[in-house]
Every structure is written in structure tokens, then in C-alpha cells.
Amino acid sequence: MSLLIKDESPEKLIGEDGKRLDGRDLNELRPIKMEVGVIPNADGSAYIEWGGNKIYAAVYGPREVHPRHDARPDRGILRTFYRMTTFSVSERKRPAPGRREKEISMVIKNAIEPVLFLELYPDSVIEVFIEVISADGGTRCACTAVAILALADAGIPMKGLITAVAAGKVDGKLIIDCSGDEDKSGEADLPCAISWYNNQIALLQFDGIMDLEEFDKSIDQIIEALEKIRKLQEEALKKRYIDVRDHLKNYKPKVVTTNNIEEKIDSNNQQNQNGGDQRE
Ligand code: ADP
């Protein structure tokens, strides 16, 4: 457990035992939990807990574009809104979306857009609202991972999933999945997302200093971590389908037999006949 005073930067991020402040090994991920289909009002939704991050994503659409001049006659458009709630960090965050939120909304959109078949939805918009309830480093990666699940839950056709994680460097050592403290006080932060359908990098940002060898090693560690996270995404999606299937199994449609229908037709005919007789 971290013994830091709120918002105080730690002197050392790796202890004598080689472990990080939260007890993790250098290449160990934080605990990750994902759930799909958590917001009944949305067309698709998902939730992720990734270390201290708690994030919801909700999808609306495809639906009509407003304002109309944004509409594209040849394809749909994707809008992503990344927001941190005022209570998501220890200092109250200003409610108005700042530059950082706009930038993260954009990088998530750029990562996801190429895997969607937007050409199927001319004149329409698909909107993804991502709300960070609690932030603790690596929110853009967690948001990318949860947004693609919400889109899948909304039934938006896609070429494949996208998974993201950040590597970093603290106290001269390469690490995977930076926490908030490591992000703030570390020497480098390297968020990266992969699009699995073509194994291409969908997002890559870099802040800090690393030599080329460290960069290559970090990318190897990222790929190893991304494969573990993708399995969790797939499990969360499968669980959603199993839940829906089980729900449908218990659903008993009302069966109307042919006899009933014939009786109904007879009685309707009779009523019409009587009505007609009265009018004559
Ligand atoms: P990411 O969350 O993708 O790592 P940043 O590197 O910009 O993005 O932010 C690192 C962490 O810094 C965030 O996850 C969050 O814990 C913290 N943070 C971001 N914005 C604020 C803010 N306005 N006030 C306090 N902490 C913040």
C-alpha cells in the first residue's frame, strides 16, 4: 500500500525489494475488471475498473446528425467525449472540459474510427460518452479499451477490438501500466493501443526520455501486456452474450394456436355481420 500524503510526489517509486509503490513487479499490470451492458438507457455500454481508474462508456446511435451540416452523405461520423468528473481526482477538477480532455477525446476517436464500418451509416452519427469517475494514471488507455466494448455492445460492426496500455520509466527502470504517481513522477510515459484486426498501432504518444533500446523493450512489454488485456475484453463481451442468451432462454413467447386464430376470425366475422345487419 502506498504511504504517500495526498498529491505528494514520492522520492522513490521502486523500493529496495525491486517492487513498485503499490507492490507490483516491474512488468505487472494492475487488477482489471470489465463489464459490458451496464447502462440500460444507452444503446451500448461498458464499465472498467483498472487499478484506481473507474470509467463508464455509453454509446448512442447510429442516429441523425445534429447540426445537419456535420452529416456526411457517404458515411457515418464518430464522436467521442472523454470527461473526468470533478471528483475523479483529489483536487476538485474544473467541470468544463479542458484542453487535455479534448486531446484525449481526439486520440481515442482516431484510434477507434479506422476499425468501424462507418460507410454503413451515411448521414448518421455514433456518439461515445466516456466518464472517468476515478482517475489514477493511464485513463486514455482504459477509456480506449472500454469505449470499444461499449461500441461492440451497441452492435456497431467492427473489424476487431482495440486494446491499450501505457509503458513507462521510473527510477531508471522500465515498467508497464503506470499508476498516477508513476505517471506524474516518472521519467517517461508511453501510452500505446493496438488494433488487432491488422496488428497495427492505433495510438502512440510519448512523454519523457528513453533511449532506442529502452523504447524497443517497452514496445515488447506493451505487446505482451496488451494480449492479456485483450483476453479480458473478450471475456467481458462473451459474458454479455451468455447473459443475453440465458435471458432469452427463460423468455416464453405467448403461443397463439391455429384454432384460436380461426375462432377469432369467426367471431370477428360474426361481429361485422351483426354490425352490418343493424345498419341495413
Ligand atoms: P492518462 O490518464 O491517460 O495517463 P495524463 O498523463 O494526462 O493522462 O494524466 C495522468 C494522471 O494525472 C491522470 O490519470 C489523473 O490521475 C491525473 N490527472 C489528470 N488531470 C488531472 C487534474 N486536472 N487534476 C488532478 N489530477 C489529474
Image: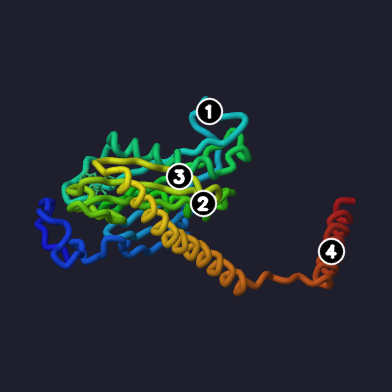
Amino acid at the residue labelled 4: Ile
Mark 2–mark 3 Cα distance, whole angstroms, equals 9 Å
Residue nearest the observer in this picture, 152 or 223: 223
Mark 2–mark 4 Cα distance, whole angstroms, equals 56 Å
Residue 42 horizontal side relative to residue 222, left or right: right
Task: Identify the residue under disc 1.
Answer: 68
Considering only order in the chain, which callout, 3 or 4, is on the residue closer to the N terminus?
A: 3
Considering only order in the chain, which callout, 1 or 3, is on the residue closer to the N terminus?
A: 1
Task: Identify the residue under disc 4.
Answer: 265
Percent x, y of residue 70: 51, 28
| Contact? badges 2 and 3 (CB < 8 Å) | no
Q: How many marks?
A: 4
| Contact? badges 1 and 4 (CB < 8 Å) | no
Farthest residue toward the top?
A: 69
Q: Secondary structure at mark 1?
A: helix
- The correct choice, above or below, for 17 with respect to 158 in the image is below
Considering only order in the chain, which callout, 2 or 1, is on the residue closer to the N terminus?
A: 1
Percent x, y of residue 75: 59, 34
